[in-house]
Image (cartoon, helix red, strand yellow):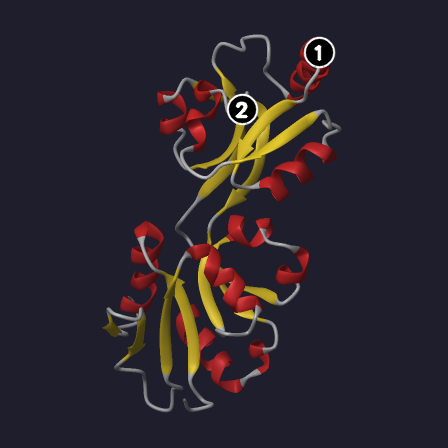
Amino acid sequence: MSKNTVNIGIPSKGRLKQDTIMVFNKRRLSFSRDERNLIGKIINSPKNCPEMKIVYLHARECIDQLSLNNIDICFSGLDLLKESEINIQKNILISKKLNFGKANLVLAIPDLWIDVQTLLDLDEVADEFKKKKKRLIRIATKYPNLTRQFLYSKGVTQFQLVQSLGSTEVAPYTGTAEIISDITSSGTTLKANKLRILKDGEILKSEACMLVNKASSKSKSVKKIIQLLSK
């Protein structure tokens, strides 16, 4: 591999993948992809532009591989960056926030909890829950770090986080958890599962970002690609 090659991680599936590809298409950059090993390249880079190798990864893995300096640039969600460990975040810079992939990480509760509207109400319920049921109220989520940080910052401490591996919205109805913390763009899925967002339950506004490894950001080749993709 040429040392002038810039390695770029993009999501391997979903809407985030398609929107990321549009970033390249708008600059008339075309992909060549090896379907077997999820490696590709840009086949029509501008003159004097470094070679761009494309690596297709899960959006979360993009963050991990970027931190390890196995790729130079990646496209992923701000939520996934902020959820990652501090030792990962310290190796990554946000080069540009993009106008797609927008969603909010929120706390949502069952519609039946009519007396719970705010975090203050939730704190009171959590305290009563512990006294009466002799256990902590459970929150299902794929974002334990962000959820914990948010609740602690608001003075809510009587809870237990439950790792969600599938559809987080069904947790209150399967008995896995009482409430959830999840990412949502329209709120439609929450409503369909008879859940509503606490009035002050927004944890993070997220969107897709172009991210760069901090060490790689000093490279002239990487700077050229960032400038090209930021136009």
* Separation (CA) of disc 1 from disc 2: 16 Å
Q: Is residue 183 above or below residue 86?
A: above
* Residue under pointer 2: 177
User: Residue at image x 32%, y 84%?
Assistant: 46
Q: How far across and how far down the image is residue 230, in percent?
A: 43, 69
User: Can residue 60 be seen here?
Assistant: yes
Where does residue 117 sit, x and y in percent of width and height?
59, 16
Whole-percent x, y for residue 203 in the image: 59, 36
Q: Residue at x 45, y 41 (%)?
A: 103
Q: Work out whether 185 lies above or below 230.
A: above
Sequence order check, earlier mark of 1 and 2: 1
In which quadrant of the rendered image does the C terminus lie? bottom left
- Specify the quadrant of the image occupied by residue 9: bottom left
Residue identified by numbered label 1 = 128
Q: Image point 37% across, 91% down: which residue?
A: 48
Comparing 201 with 161, the one in front is: 161
Q: Could you say which is closer to the camera, residue 204 or residue 89?
A: 89
Question: Which quadrant holds the N terminus?
Answer: bottom left
What is the three-letter code of the residue carrying label 1? Answer: Glu
Give the numbered dot on residue 203: none
Give x and y (percent) for residue 50: 40, 86
Q: How many marks?
A: 2
Amino acid type of disc 2? Ala
Q: Secondary structure at mark 2?
A: loop
Q: Secondary structure at mark 1?
A: helix
Report crowding for label 2: few under 14, some 14 to 19, many 20 or more residues within 10 A (C-alpha).
Answer: many
Q: Is residue 157 left or right of residue 116?
A: right
Q: Residue at x 30, y 63 (%)?
A: 21
Disc 1 crowd rating (10 Å Cα; few below 14, some 14-19, many 20+) is some
